[in-house]
Amino acid sequence: MNILIAISDSYVPYAAVMLQSLADSNPNLCFNVYIICPDITVRNLEKLYKQFNSNATGQISIYCLEISQQIQDEIRDISPYIIEKLNTSFILRLFAPRILPNDIEQILYLDVDTVVSSSLNELTTMQLDDETALAAVKDLIRFDDYSRLGIDKNKHTYFNSGVMLLNLAYWRKHNVGDKCLQLLVKYSSLYKFPDQDALNVVCEGKVKYLHPKYNCLLFFYARKEFLKARIWKEEYDRVLEAIEHPVIIHYVFVNKPWYKGEDLPKRELWMSALQKTVWKDMPLEYRNGTKGMFRLILKYFASRALPFIGIQYQGNIFTKHRYKHIEILALAIYYGFAYWLPNFDSRFFGKISNAIRVWCVKNIFEYVGQGVNIGRKARFGNGRNIRIGSRSNIGAYSLVPSDIVIGDNVMMGPNNFFFGGFTHNISDNAKPMIDQGFKFIEGRTEIGDDVWIGRECLFMPCKKIGSHSVVGARSVVTKDVPEYVIVGGNPAKVIKSRK
């Protein structure tokens, strides 16, 4: 398989780490790695050859490509149009069709701030047709780029360019690289992510989209309240699959894994690959030097000092620290005070009462979405592992168990009762049931999105209520409820479909 990297000399150690992870995750594949690096030093080139080309297995072969004087002049001419904080190494890949051997028709481009964690077998057999410029992963957190770049969102979805399977035959035929460079000069002030923006404009409607697992952006590992609010709803399940089984992890933030002291998801994979390279003794530095060091020190003390005065400080968007004393305080305020306040739909103090209850459950539940309502005298035990989505409610006087997931836009009437995930053990007929104790039921109760639950319903343990369904008042739910149906009765049965 052919791999392309475009870097400056200072990024060579990070490229070696990425390539080491590539080799470790694909022991049965061989790779020809083509590196475009105009300023690579002899020392770094020798280290790369030592690590890979001298390997007896021959799994990775390094080819450092020479750049003609003409291309060097073009890079110099375009440099004034590049955002000042960026160097020009990122545009090198736009010259790939002109620099790479003509017999290479497809190549996988990888940013060096990636780590490969699983097999690339599927990509090795993927063939792009004559009308496809590249294969890439949708950038699922971009919303304003379509109007900014004049892209028709019905025709094209903005993609992240950190991982791309390039159809070089198409690029050569349609001059993709040259067209991108022309746009960078013409719209230099408009393009926030210069070559990525240009590629999305030039390749509009000519892209094959890959599963997010092939470019698992670091943002995907954010806490669910951040992720669910920003990721497109129709892609959310695929993103969850990606973070469970990533193939390529992309550290897209400024907090790269090679910076000292950064607490990033999956950083251990990068560190493990580093230890297998000839740069394993490379000293790591703080981002922004001394200033960055003091920033991390302040975050460290804030994360330990603020919780003592009842403030839930979260150091980053990836991890959520649970402070037991704040949780206990919130439980005490809820059951001792907020529990008794008027219902959220009350004309008098309804909104204030609900705001107090929501503050409590945000410090108790695992996740609480936006616009949530908690009914008067709603009970949830200690609130362990409860998730409730945006614009959903727990009905007044209702009892929900721990380990329940309530989706978005769920309407719940009052006096509903959900059994917890355990029941009496009655298997031994020779022994009184009262003496047989309890047995736990595997699983948890799950309520999908856009569900309407009437009043005074009874739910047996660990049932799943499908999205877009209606559960009629006083129903006794003993089985899972499918999507898009109306159920009712005792036991609850499907009355009709909503489709």
Image: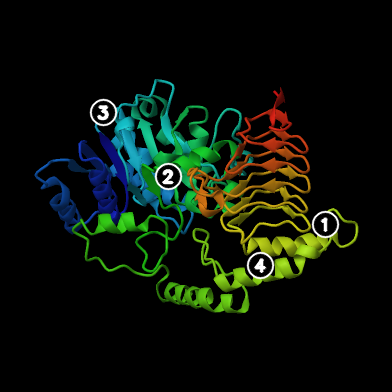
Q: Secondary structure at mark 1?
A: loop
The numbered mark, 2 or 1, whose residue comes first in the sequence reads 2
Mark drawn on residue 331: 4
Work out how far the residue at label 3 is from the one at label 2, CA to CA, in angstroms. Answer: 38 Å
Q: Whole-percent x and y of residue 128?
A: 38, 24
Q: Nearer the viewer, mark 1 or mark 3?
A: 1
Work out how far the residue at label 4 is from the one at label 3, CA to CA, in angstroms. Answer: 68 Å
The numbered mark, 3 or 2, whose residue comes first in the sequence reads 3
Work out how far the residue at label 4 is from the one at label 1, CA to CA, in angstroms. Answer: 18 Å
Quarter of the C terminus within the rendering: top right
* Residue marked by disc 2: 244
Residue type for callout 2: Glu
The numbered mark, 4 or 1, whose residue comes first in the sequence reads 4
Residue 111 vs residue 316, the one in the foreground: 316
The numbered mark, 2 or 4, whose residue comes first in the sequence reads 2
Q: Nearer the viewer, mark 4 or mark 3?
A: 4
Mark drawn on residue 343: 1
Relative vertical location of residue 478 with respect to residue 351 in this rendering, above or below: above
Q: Secondary structure at mark 3?
A: loop
In the rendered image, the residue lying farthest to the right is 347
The numbered mark, 4 or 3, whose residue comes first in the sequence reads 3
Tell me whether the residue at label 2 lies in contact with that at label 4, contact meaning CB atoms closer than 8 angstroms: no
Q: Residue at x 49, y 43 (%)?
A: 427
Tell me whether the residue at label 2 lies in contact with that at label 1, contact meaning CB atoms closer than 8 angstroms: no
Q: Residue at x 39, y 21 (%)?
A: 129
Q: Whole-percent x and y of residue 162?
A: 41, 44
Mark drawn on residue 102: 3
The numbered mark, 1 or 3, whose residue comes first in the sequence reads 3
Q: Nearer the viewer, mark 2 or mark 1?
A: 1
Residue type for callout 4: Leu
